[in-house]
Amino acid sequence: MSNADINDAGLHVEEVNLVEIAKKYGTPCYVYSRKALTESYTAYRNALAGHNDGNSLICYAVKANSNLAILNIFARLGAGFDIVSGGELARVIAAGGDAKKTVFSGVGKSHDEISAALQAGIKCFNIESSSELGRINTVAGNLGLVAPVSIRVNPDVDAKTHPYISTGLKTSKFGVAYGEALPLYRFAATMPNINVVGIDCHIGSQLLDSAPVAEATQKILSLVDALAAEGIKLKHIDIGGGMGIRYNDEAMPSTAEYLAPVLKTLAGRNESLLLEPGRSLVGNAGILLTKVEVLKQGGNDRDFVIIDAAMNDLMRPALYDAWHNIVPVRPRSGEARLCEVVGPVCESGDFLGHDRRLSVQEGDLLAILSAGAYGMTMSSNYNTRPRAAEVMVDGDKTYLIRKREEVAQLFAEEALLP
Ligand code: LLP
């Protein structure tokens, strides 16, 4: 299952009608399906089963959706985690995740974050610069520990995705330039508090074709072999995340089809394989449920459908011009009109969908689909709007996994001058 399915009673997630969820928890509200989360994880697991005796680890990229219930579902399924902050590490631990299966990515890890991760005993730091390598060596030395590291290499491959989410070109702030990787590994191997264990790359997100990832993997393998020839033997190869999802009518390969070229490139290798998928595990397992507040006639040929969700709840349309399908929870038979679906935030950029054909009335419920990834995690309190509730559906049951914020909470930490 993905997203929400429609039956005679209207739109539902698993066995629960979205009208019931809106009644019980209010709107706007993120709704996730445990079944869809499990299925997307299992698709990875199955695709990797035949590779290297199943010697691979799926490290869920926490930034895609960091709700504790979601992390816990993946932890129970055996997943590891890819984190980018001390905050995400704390979430993984609070959700019952295993630090020993956690890799720490990101270009600007602070002393405190490094120290917390070392003390938690994480699997590996994905290093993004020589300065960071030195810093980790120092912090580990002060703690009397040895830090396991992998160097994130920038393979200079064009992932052919949105420029904001493309990270593998040499102009990107991410990773260590390909030509600098070998000298940095040699240097790392001499450091007393560093243990070189792996290599990684991540070239971009929402990739519909894995050919660039296979190309990047091939380039990474040349480095692995060159290092082995010098006696520096790596234990794992981490090819990052990036597999896309279908938002509209994209021709999207299955997980197995997507991974096949990469697995072919890695066939016969002894190093274990790590992946860091985010979006493809959660994106189509969640929707944003919202209510039509106001209908307003527009100046041109289209009307405004003003809903109670806004750019602060789901930033992707405003930030990337991203397209999310928007469907009525109970379809009406009336004439569908051309609409702009917008939120109540005071910004012209506050839209959820341009040029949609909808037949709706004030008070109707709409579902914004494929909102499970980079939805709630990128939300904010702009315009002093409490963040949405989050609900998990499991069969015919629903669980509140994050309470809607209350207005008083939003300024509780602020202070007046004396
Ligand atoms: N590993 C690293 C090092 C990453 O930077 C990312 C995502 C991932 C893994 C997971 O990638 P995924 O499998 O989700 O594509 N906010 C944007 C996406 C930003 C992705 C950032 N890095 C969006 O809403 O499209």
Image (cartoon, rainbow, N blue to C red):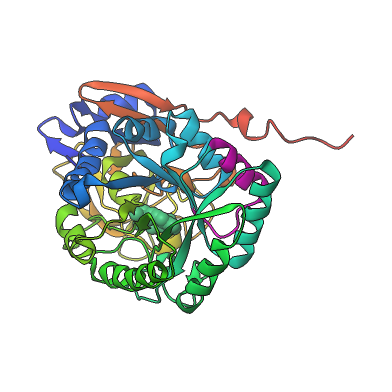
Image quarter of the N terminus: top left
Give 34 or 140, whichever is nearer the viewer.
140
Give 365 or 154, whichever is nearer the viewer.
154
Task: Specify whether residue 100 is painted magenta.
Answer: no
Image quarter of the C terminus: top right
Residue 360 makes an appearance in the image: no
Residue 30 makes an appearance in the image: yes
Residue lying furthest left: 8
Looking at the image, how many numbered discs can be counted on the residues?
0
Q: Is residue 214 above or below residue 269?
A: below
Q: Which residues are magenta?
A: 105-120
Question: Residue 9 lies in what quarter of the image?
Answer: top left
Whether residue 66 sits left or right of residue 366 in the image: it is right
Residue sitting at 63 percent across and 28 percent down? 408
Whether residue 415 sits left or right of residue 374 in the image: it is right
Decide whether the magenta segment is chiefly helix, strand or loop.
Answer: helix
Question: Residue 304 lies in what quarter of the image?
Answer: bottom left
Q: Is residue 44 above or below residue 155?
A: above
Task: Specify whether residue 116 is painted magenta.
Answer: yes
Q: Position of residue 298 (x, y in %)?
A: 37, 59
Give 227 or 387, whichever is nearer the viewer.
227
